[in-house]
Amino acid sequence: MLFDDVTAATLSSALRGYEARNLAISNNLANSETPGYKRLDVSFESALASATHDAHSLSGMARSEAADLVAGVMPSSTADTVTAMRTDGGNVDPDTEMAALARNQLAHQTVTSLLDKHLTLIRTAIIGR
């Protein structure tokens, strides 16, 4: 982990989560007409928030342990087996998925920008410009 940095670890974990969600949404769209296909969703925000809170609140924890705690958060994928929209058992609504894809891409771009700014601050501290 770069400098055992909890902020960089948090942002990197968020990027992994958004990338996993993007893949799930893409699979949902690709299978929107597949009979019996159940849409997938990826969750990681609450686990990441909890790990980040724990990393900041544990006073005796070494910086590397705190960063490792946050970096270890993995996105989890779940199938939506409750909803059935169509008679063929499928439950993917392409309009809903496209809206989710747009939200996810915006969040990914935001986190990428934050990580870039964070690394720029580190670079500025090291080289002084």
Image (tube, rainbow, N blue to C red):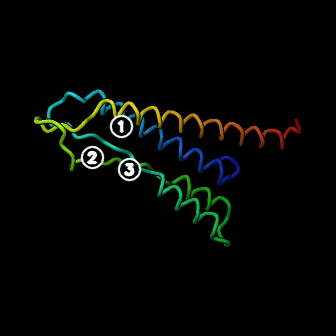
Examine the rendered structure and indicate whether residue 93 appears above or below residue 121. Answer: above
User: Do callouts 3 and 1 mark residues in contact (Cβ within 8 Å)?
Assistant: no
Mark drawn on residue 24 = 1
Residue 95 percent coordinates (x, y): 33, 30
Sequence order check, earlier mark of 1 and 2:
1
The residue that mark 2 highlights is 79
Give the CA separation, mark 3 to mark 1: 11 Å
Horizontal side, residue 36 vs residue 29: left or right? left
Specify the quadrant of the image occupied by residue 28.
Answer: top left
Most extreme residue toward the right is 128
Question: Going by the picture, which residue comes out furthest to the bottom?
Answer: 60
Considering only order in the chain, which callout, 1 or 3, is on the residue closer to the N terminus?
1
Q: In the displayed structure, would residue 121 be above or below residue 34? A: below
Classify 10 Å Cα crowding around label 2: few (below 14), some (14-19), many (20 and above). few
Measured as percent of width and height from the top left, residue 89 is found at 14, 39
Looking at numbered disc 3 in the image, what kind of residue is underneath it? Ser
| Horizontal side, residue 129 vs residue 66: left or right | right
- At mark 2, the secondary structure is strand
Residue type, numbered disc 1: Ala
Instruction: Give the residue pinned by disc 3.
Output: 76
Q: Secondary structure at mark 1?
A: helix
